[in-house]
Amino acid sequence: MAVSGGESLDKLEDMIVRAAESTATHAQAAKDAIGGVIFGQEQVVEQALITILSGGHALLVGVPGLAKTKLVDTMGTVLGLDARRIQFTPDLMPSDILGSEVLEESAGGKRSFRFIPGPVFAQLLMADEINRASPRTQSALLQAMQEQHVTVAGARHDVPKPFHVLATQNPLEQEGTYPLPEAQLDRFLMQIDVHYPDREAERRMLFDTTGAEESKPKAAMSAEELISAQRLVRRLPVGESVVDAILALVRSARPGEAAGEVSQLIAWGPGPRASQALMLAVRARALLDGRLAPSIDDVLELAEPVLKHRMALTFAARAEGETIEAVIARLKSRIG
């Protein structure tokens, strides 16, 4: 019996709906599992998960001691990923990240080079205090983040799939640091600000971390399930009104595009990669929330973490006390 085009389309939609419901359940379980170990950072956990579901990388900005390292370790366990950590220092060399070739001699006396992979060959990589490394070392990680492979001695080596970098940056200690260039900042899907937990969360943390038994994370997803979820995110439909909101918001954050006085405040703004990042992030947020399509509320919620590291204010605007957050809030008020 022949199946009409309409019926096959309906079957495809049913498959996507069932896959989305199953994936949303797994993603919510992962969020709960991470929240059971990382206290008082619900928004940080959600934004980090959205970044991973979108297939991107995140920059975590916060003072020391706010469980940024613990978050990455926990996410590795919960998502079933091979997680590693690199402590960035001024003397760190590119080979310390990528790996190097060593000369070996076989039993027969034949010499050959063998590649020893560095810590970048992980599925979830924590780049701790990334702005402490030299620009040369930062750019070595940049290639892996953008191209999903590294080149050592002219030979290409692919990084594992999935591959995600969660980098941390201390906003206070700027002595002996190399600020990340705009090109590298643009590679991060989101900048996630990690703030102090509230009193009740810190109280829970005290009891959990200083007692005889500390809460341990449990796996909620596998690497294969995560890859399937990332593919599904790209298949979720996006309404025209949401696409228009994304375009209007990103384009208004560029100098000359913003209307009125806001245009005079912006020195440089986000490029098309910001639109792509926001498009993926709103889909991932909808899926994490158990919805089959994103809304304008998702766009407004994720505007700041997606845009704030992709734009800068003029010197005059900074002198007058303007902030990136306040400018983005003004741009959002025109959308919502």
Image (spheres, rainbow, N blue to C red):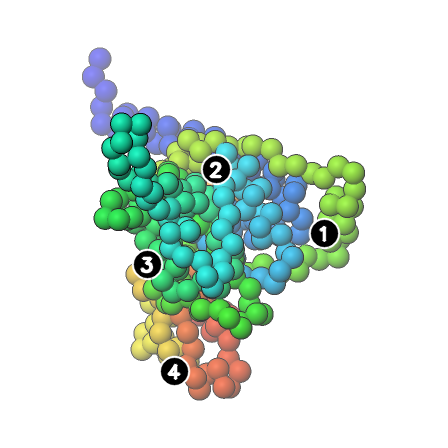
Q: Residue at x 75, y 37 (%)?
A: 213
The image position of residue 78, as x and y in percent, is 55, 36
* Quadrant into which the N terminus falls: top left
Q: Is residue 55 visible?
A: no
Q: Secondary structure at mark 3?
A: helix
**Residue 196: quarter of image:** bottom right
Residue highlighted by disc 2: 82
Query: The residue under label 2 is which amino acid type?
Result: Asp
**Near-viewer residue (285 or 168):** 168
The image position of residue 195, as x and y in percent, is 62, 61
Query: The residue under label 4 is which amino acid type?
Result: Gln
Disc 1 versus disc 2: distance between alpha carbons?
28 Å
Q: Residue at x 31, y 41 (%)?
A: 103
Residue highlighted by disc 4: 264
Query: The residue under label 3 is which amino acid type?
Result: Arg
Residue highlighted by disc 1: 201
Q: Residue at x 40, y 57 (%)?
A: 93
The label number, if any, that marks residue 273 in the structure image: 3
Q: Secondary structure at mark 1?
A: helix
Vertical comparison of 33 with 329: above or below: above
Disc 3 versus disc 4: distance between alpha carbons?
23 Å
**Label 1 or label 2, whichever comes before in sequence order:** 2
- Asked whether disc 4 touches disc 2, contact meaning CB atoms under 8 Å apart, the reply is no
